[in-house]
Image: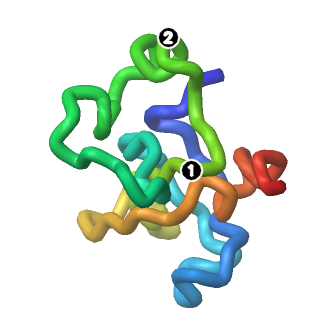
Amino acid sequence: MKVIGATTTYVGSEITVLHGQRVRIFGVMRGALRPDVNVDADDYFLTDDEVLARLGGVTRLDRLDVAHLRADGSASFVHCDPRAIDLECFADLKD
């Protein structure tokens, strides 16, 4: 599955202004929700689908770097990091 560059809908409630909005994925912060996450690890922030797939893909413990899509289809320069399960394309990862 193509993750980086994919467009999906934010369906969570953590970032209220994004609820129901279309977003584009720019990266994956692997294990960002783990209490022992090492944000300095080489494989923490991924922007390559092949590497992501080799490491097991997106999990419910990940956060994703996303940007809101404007009406013209361009991505905002403002990024945020919702939980993977708060994006429509990964909602099936919920417990």
How far apart in space, not on screen, are marks 1 and 2 (Cα)?
Answer: 17 Å
Q: Quadrant of residue 67?
A: bottom left
Q: How far across and down, in percent of the image, does residue 85 sit?
A: 68, 57
Q: Quadrant of residue 75?
A: bottom left
Measured from the top left, where is residue 8 in percent x and y? 64, 52
Viewport quadrant of the C terminus: bottom right
- The answer to whether 20 appears left or right of 29 in the picture is right
Q: Quadrant of residue 14?
A: bottom right
- Amino acid carrying label 2: it is Arg
Most foreground residue, 95 or 1: 95
Residue 54's disc is 2
State which tag comes first along the sequence, 1 or 2: 2
The circle on residue 2 is: none
Q: Is residue 74 visible?
A: no
Residue type at mark 1? Leu
The one nearer the camera, 85 or 22, is 85
- Residue drawn at 29 percent across, 39 percent down: 45
The disc label shown at residue 61, or none: 1
Query: What is the x, y in percent for residue 69?
Result: 47, 62
Q: Is residue 3 above or below residue 35?
A: above
Picture coordinates of residue 22 (x, y %)?
A: 60, 63
Q: Left or right of 45: which side holds 73?
A: right
Whether 83 is drawn above or below 59: the answer is: below
Residue drawn at 68 percent across, 74 percent down: 12
| Residue positioned most to the bottom | 16
| Residue at left offset 23%, top offset 48% | 39
